[in-house]
């Protein structure tokens, strides 16, 4: 395991991991909800940009700030919320639409009413770029 520094939202942590990507994922697990709304009304794809660098050796008891940071982009799609007890979702396919440079559709579970929205032209909430796969689940009203 290698010691990395991982930084996101101006919060830096020392993390032991097997790769920079694993260090970024560990930062997300430890800090989910930091500087974000911790009470979302929907479950949607999350985009993360975590900066990772090899942790320099301490000099005089202090660790110098690294100069070579790597930006690691992590995309995490949500798992669907549970259906009714003992049941699995049965998705009814909705109409397929076009928007931007991609397609979008909404499926609805015929058992519990949860909606699943999917598009391949979603916007990355971290950098504003478009053209990303995005999944969002919404509970029935």
Image (tube, grey):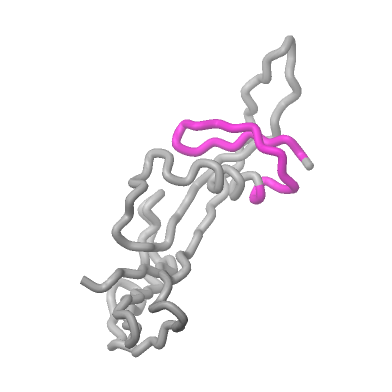
Residue at image location 45% in from the left, 65% down from the top: 78
In the picture, measured across the screen, residue 23 lies left or right of residue 135, that is: right
> Which stretch appears magenta?
2-22
Q: How many discs mark residues in the rendered view?
A: 0
Where is the N terminus found, in terms of image quarters? top right
From the viewer's perspective, is residue 95 above or below residue 16? below
Q: Quadrant of residue 9?
A: top left
Residue 13 lies in what quarter of the image? Answer: top right
Q: Nearer the viewer, residue 29 or 94?
A: 29
The residue furthest top is: 60
Above-or-below relation of 20 to 120? above
Furthest toward the right, the residue is 1
Q: Is residue 112 left or right of residue 56?
A: left
Q: Is residue 113 left or right of residue 67?
A: left
**Residue at x 30% of width, y 69% of height:** 138
Looking at the picture, does residue 56 appear above or below residue 111?
Answer: above
Q: Position of residue 98 (x, y in %)?
A: 29, 80
Residue furthest left as drawn:
141
User: Percent x, y for residue 135?
Assistant: 40, 69
Where residue 66 sits in the image (x, y, percent)? Answer: 64, 27
For the stretch drawn in magenta, the main secondary structure is strand
Q: Nearer the viewer, residue 8 or 100?
A: 8
**Where the C terminus falls, by quadrant?**
bottom left
On screen, residue 3 above or below 112: above
Residue closer to the observer: 131 or 59? 59
* Identity of the residue drawn at 53% across and 52% down: 73
Residue 6 painted magenta: yes
């Amino acid at each position: 395991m290698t010691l990395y520094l991982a930084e996101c939202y101006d919060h830096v942590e020392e993390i032991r991991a097997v790769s920079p990507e694993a260090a970024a994922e560990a930062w997300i697990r430890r800090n989910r909800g930091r500087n974000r709304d911790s009470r979302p009304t929907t479950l949607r794809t999350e985009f993360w940009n975590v900066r990772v660098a090899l942790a320099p050796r301490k000099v005089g008891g202090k660790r110098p700030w690294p100069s070579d940071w790597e930006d690691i982009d992590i995309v995490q799609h949500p798992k669907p919320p549970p259906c009714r007890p003992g049941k699995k979702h049965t998705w009814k396919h909705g109409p397929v639409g076009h928007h931007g440079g991609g397609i979008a559709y909404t499926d609805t579970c015929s058992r519990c009413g949860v909606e699943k929205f999917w598009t391949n032209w979603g916007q990355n909430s971290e950098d504003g770029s478009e053209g990303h796969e995005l999944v969002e689940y919404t509970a029935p009203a």
